[in-house]
Image (cartoon, rainbow, N blue to C red):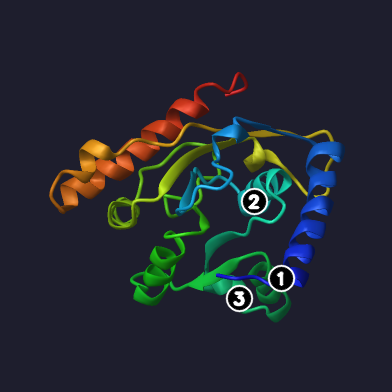
Amino acid sequence: MKQSLPRHLWVFLSACAIGCYASLINRFRAVGIEHIPPAPGRGVMLAANHTSAYDTVFLPWVVIRRFPRRMIWAPAKQELFRNRFLGWLIHSWGAFPVNRGRDLRAWWLIASLLKTETVMLFPEGTRHGDGTLGHGNRAVGKLIYDTRPIVVPCAISGLNNWRFPGRGQRARVVFGPPVEFSDLYQAKKSKETYNLVVDRVMAAISGLLATDPQR
């Protein structure tokens, strides 16, 4: 999707404001950002664990800080768009509404974006406020199998303990090397294959979480 210069400028400036709160007032750190391809020529999925509403703000900020002209797209639950101002705000940052349950329109939109754009997804499909890592959703495995994007695992830790406003709070995100699926892409389409795909993503995220000395 092509984006206007004013929208890119708005996203960049708001990301700068978020960055001041995250890394100057607080202590949010990013590790492994080099694993995100700068100009891949194909879709990129940022697959992250989900422990806090802050995840949807600080993960895109880290990427935009490195790639200022990059738009990060993300599905968000429909309820967030009921408030007109909040809906406009998160939409301006690249979020789009998804109905709970089976939303084929959103599915095809995500699949279309993953051909050329960067999309942030939480494979668990729900938040785990205690910081534990849940099971991946098989639908995400199917999405990866069907679209074949570059999948960069992201492990977020500490944000579930943050409070706003606050200062001196610690958190970090670790990006790992893209997950390899070539063997699974040769397997036939099936629920079992989709489960294996998403399980591999979750295993990569789990491995990154294990590197956090504060966990």
Please report contact status of discs 1 and 2: CB closer than 8 Å, yes or no.
no
Q: Amino acid at mark 3?
A: Phe
User: In the depicted view, which residue is nearer to us: 104 or 151?
Assistant: 151
Give the numbered dot on residue 89. 1
Left or right of 155 in this view: 8: right
Position above or below: 32 against 124: above
- Can residue 174 be seen at all in this image of the molecule? no
Q: Secondary structure at mark 3?
A: helix
Which mark is nearer the camera, 2 or 3? 2
Residue 54 % position (x, y): 66, 50
Assess disc 1: are there few (<14), some (14-19) or many (≥20) residues with their C-alpha within 10 Å of its C-alpha: few
Q: Secondary structure at mark 2?
A: helix
Q: Amino acid at mark 1?
A: Leu
- Of pointers 1 and 2, the one earlier in the residue sequence: 2
Left or right of 127 in this view: 159: right
Residue 65 % position (x, y): 73, 46
Q: Amino acid at mark 2?
A: Pro
Residue for badge 3: 81
Assess disc 3: are there few (<14), some (14-19) or many (≥20) residues with their C-alpha within 10 Å of its C-alpha: some
Image point (52%, 39%), residue name: 154
Q: Secondary structure at mark 1?
A: helix
- Of pointers 3 and 1, the one earlier in the residue sequence: 3
Residue for badge 2: 60
Q: Measure the alpha-carbon separation of dots 3 and 1.
A: 9 Å
- Can residue 91 be seen at all in this image of the molecule? yes
Residue 158 % position (x, y): 64, 35
Position above or below: 105 against 16: below
Please report contact status of discs 3 and 1: CB closer than 8 Å, yes or no.
no
Image point (73%, 77%), residue name: 85
**In the rendered image, which quarter contains the N terminus?**
bottom right
Which mark is nearer the camera, 3 or 1? 1
